[in-house]
Image: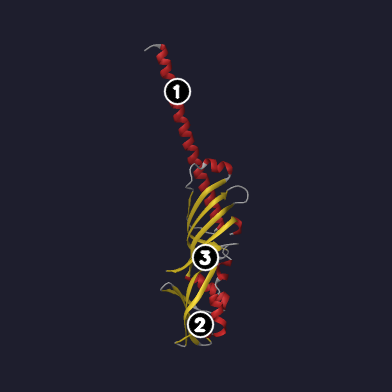
Amino acid sequence: MSAERRRRRGCLVTFVLALLLLGGGTLLAEYASRSLVQSVATDALRNGLHTDTSIDVEVPEHPVLPQLIRGELTDVRVQADTARIRGIDIVDLQAQASGVRIRGERGADDVTVTGTLPTDTLQSLLAERTGWDLDLAEQDGQLVLSGEALGVPVTASLQVGAVDGALSATITQATLGGFTIDALQLPLGLNDQLGDLAGITDQLAAQATITDAQVVAGGLRVTLTLHDVLLADL
C-alpha cells in the first residue's frame, strides 16, 4: 500500500472516530440533561405536592438539551400515588403541563390535572361546609349521604358533575325517616348546602377550571385545568 493511500485511510478512520465520539458525546449530554431535568422536576413537584411517595416524571419531547438551555420544557407528564394540595388529599394523580419554566419562578403555561378525592376527604369537607356529620358512600355512580337530622334518619343521593368550570351536585333522591321526600323538604337548608359543592375544589388551586367530575369507586374523580400557573400557587 502506498504512503498516499495509507494517509487517506488514516484520515478516513480519524474522521469516522471523530463522528462516533461526537455522536456519543451528544447522546451522553442528552442522557445527562434528561436525568437532570427529571431529578429537578421530581424534587420540585414532591415539595409542591407535599408528598413523600414516588413521583414518575416524563419529558417525552426530544431532544431535552435545547429545552434545558432555554429554561423551558415543552411537555412534562407526571404521575403520583398521593398528593396534598392546599390541605386536600388527592390520590392517583396524573398531570400534563406545557411550557414548563424550570428557571426563576417555576411554573407552566397550561396544566391539566386529574386526581381522585377519596371518600373520607369528601366526607370531612362536606362536614366542614354543612355542619352535618353525614356518612358518605358511592353507589351506582352517585354519592350517597346518610345520617340523622334532628334525630331523624336522612339520606340523599347526589349526581355530581362539572358545570361552568365548577363542581355541581343535584339531589336525585332524598328520604327522611324512611319516607321519600322532595329535596326541598330536607331540613335546615341541607338541600342548598349539598347542592353547592363548588367550594370543595375552590381551594385546590387558584383560577382552576373543573372540566370533568365523576363518582368512582373510592371517591370523586376530578379533572381541572390551569393557565399561567406558578408551582408556588398550588
Question: Which residue matches tag 3?
Answer: 89
Q: Residues within 10 Å of mark 3 (few under 14, many from 20)?
A: many
Question: Which residue matches tag 2?
Answer: 183
Tag 2, which secondary structure?
helix
Q: Earlier in the sequence, mark 1 or mark 3?
A: 1
What is the quadrant of the C terminus in the image? bottom right
- Give residue 194's position: percent from left, percent from top: 53, 77
- Residue 220 visible in the picture: no
Tag 3, which secondary structure?
strand
**Marks 3 and 2, Cα distance to the nearest angstrom?**
30 Å
In the rendered structure, which amino acid carries the disc numbered 2? Answer: Ala
Q: Who is closer to the viewer here, 193 or 166? A: 166
- Give residue 161's position: percent from left, percent from top: 49, 69
Residue at the spot 54% in from the left edge and 43% down from the top edge: 67
In the rendered structure, which amino acid carries the disc numbered 1? Answer: Thr
Looking at this view, name the residue that lies furthest to the front.
Answer: 164
Residue 14 image label: 1
In the rendered structure, which amino acid carries the disc numbered 3? Answer: Asp
- Residue 97 visible in the picture: yes
**Marks 1 and 3, Cα distance to the nearest angstrom?**
60 Å
What is the quadrant of the N terminus in the image? top left
Examine the rendered structure and indicate whether residue 167 appears above or below residue 13.
Answer: below
Residue at the spot 47% in from the left edge and 71% down from the top edge: 119
Examine the rendered structure and indicate whether residue 73 appears above or below residue 165.
Answer: above
**Marks 2 and 1, Cα distance to the nearest angstrom?**
84 Å
Relative to residue 189, is residue 181 drawn left or right? left
In this view, the mark in front (3 or 2): 2
Residue at the spot 40% in from the left edge and 14% down from the top edge: 5
Say how many tags the image has: 3
